[in-house]
Image: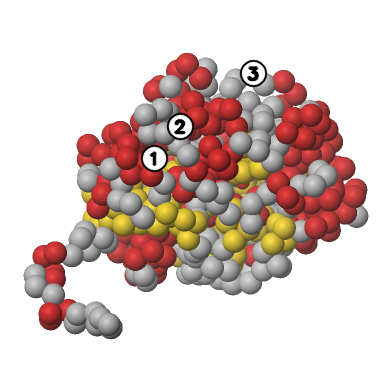
Amino acid sequence: MTSRAPTPSQLPHCREAAPAMLSLGLDSSTQSCSAIVIDTETQTIVAETSVNFGQRLPHYNAPSGFIPDGAAGEVHADPRMWLDALELLFEELKDQCELAKIAAISGAGQQHGSVYLNDQWLNAIDTLDASESLSAQIQPCLARRTAPIWMDTSTGAECREIAAALGGDEVVCAKSGSIPIERFTGPQIRRFYKNDPAGYAQTAHIHLVSSFLCSVLCGADAPIDTGDGAGMNLLNIHTWDWDPELLAATAPELGKRLPDAAPGNTTAGQISEYFVEKYGFAQGTPITLFTGDNPSSLVGMGASRPGKVVLSLGTSDTFFAAMPGVVADPQGCGHVFGNPAGGSMSLQCFVNGSLAREAVKDKFNYDWDQFTAAFNKTPVANDDQVMLPFFRPEISPRIDLAAPILKGSEAFENWQDADAAIRACVEGQFINMKLRSDWMQLQPEVIYLTGGASQNDAIAQVVADIFQAKVQRLAVSSSVALGAALRAASHTLGLNLHQLESQFCQPEAGSTIEPQAAIDSYQTATANFSALLAKS
Ligand code: XUL
């Protein structure tokens, strides 16, 4: 007997009966685990909550999300803390919205962190008992008690060894999108293998924070997506698959310990019975691969298509953007990751962000209002006086300075002109950023500013003038979790991602700043900056 699907008109009360199109995005970051639930029909955020690791789980002794005082640059966290936080989060979320109505789920994790699991892992996540905690049931699977995270700088020797095995930093960069970087997962795995060969031998599976949590939710081993996977120095950015040479240079038989690599818009599986029984999720809810926090934020800021740049102005500044092609930074300072919406994205970190802005302000005992007023008292491009605004060793470009270098009038060079010094610091930061991001071959139409300093109009104006692009601040607060919810909605519910971005990622009213300076205003200052850098 054949049955025919009813047409919509045959379905009584079809519209009223349609379930809400809810999508859940998770964000397991350094300090907290957060969730956002969006309703794609009403285009609203229906629930939002966050669990701070240090405050809510003080017994892990990680007040800022990591175990303090690690030896030799080690910075680790306890994966059980991430699991406990996930459970607290679901407890809170189920009071805010009916979890059974969630039709799509995805998430993101802090990048680079790695979890080492033994051969009990697959069985454990497949047979979780809802009357016990996740952390108690997964603890016996940990082949390494703690997980190194992105703040770990202990792997300098391993970076050099991997580069030497491949034929130099440039070779690793051309293949993986980054030179060997201390915090990246490959060098971290190599250090574990060297320091604890028995622990490495016990390790049957290695996951990133993102794929670890995704696997727990699915009750099965989830692939690593190309966004987070490219932060490992193991993924080839031309094939988007594990690179045999990089694997071999990192640790023996590494390939068999890694899950598959897959594009972000892949279904990892369905939510496991544990979460259905314990928190009331609907059976069979599909889960889209998790990704890294930065790739997720690219989507959550509404910038998953080339032409838009995200500039996060924090302690350090981060520049990221969808890229039109796949190119690696020839200077080896930037990173290429997979774009979870397809294609690739760039990311570049600048150590001297708010750190430098604050240092120059403090040097003159200014408050932030005086700092901002300095821009009205000085001309655009500062009469071509420039500063290398590096109060600490910088990584973009790599330069080992402990104090800025100034070039201009005698008073300026002697730090006697406070207003010019403040303008020079900020202009120097963004001239540098423009020079360092040339390799990405971008033509930004709009720059989305986020982070603490993004609210400062004077800084935003300098950004608009130097990049000759309009600058906007977005009303989005948790762009990482929102990015995950948008990705899940697009992949599972078949909605157009760009349309979702324009619905959920709106600029703050009145926040747009247009370039005011003429296109060539910064020509001489940029040449002066480059010359000063070349000499330093
Ligand atoms: C990016 C990086 C951090 C982490 C934590 O390379 O290390 O941004 O993703 O947020």
Q: Which residue is drawn at 13% across and 75% down?
A: 11
Q: Earlier in the sequence, mark 2 or mark 1?
A: 2
For this orientation, the residue located farthest to the front is 1
Q: Position of residue 465 (x, y in %)?
A: 50, 61
Q: Which amino acid does label 2 sit on?
A: Leu
Residue that badge 3 annotates: 69
Q: Nearer the viewer, residue 397 or 334?
A: 334
Crowding at mark 3 (Cα within 10 Å: few <14, some 14-19, many 20+): few
Dividing the picture into quadrants, the one containing residue 252 is: top right
Q: Can residue 490 be seen in this view?
A: yes
Q: Which amino acid does label 1 sit on?
A: Tyr
Q: Which of 475 and 503 is in front in this view?
A: 503
Q: Which of marks 2 and 3 is in front?
A: 2
Q: Do the residues labelled 2 and 1 touch (CB within 8 Å)?
A: yes
Q: Which mark is residue 339?
A: none
Q: Does dot 3 land on a helix, a strand or a loop?
A: loop
Crowding at mark 2 (Cα within 10 Å: few <14, some 14-19, many 20+): many
Q: Which of marks 2 and 3 is nearer the N terminus?
A: 3
Residue that badge 2 annotates: 134
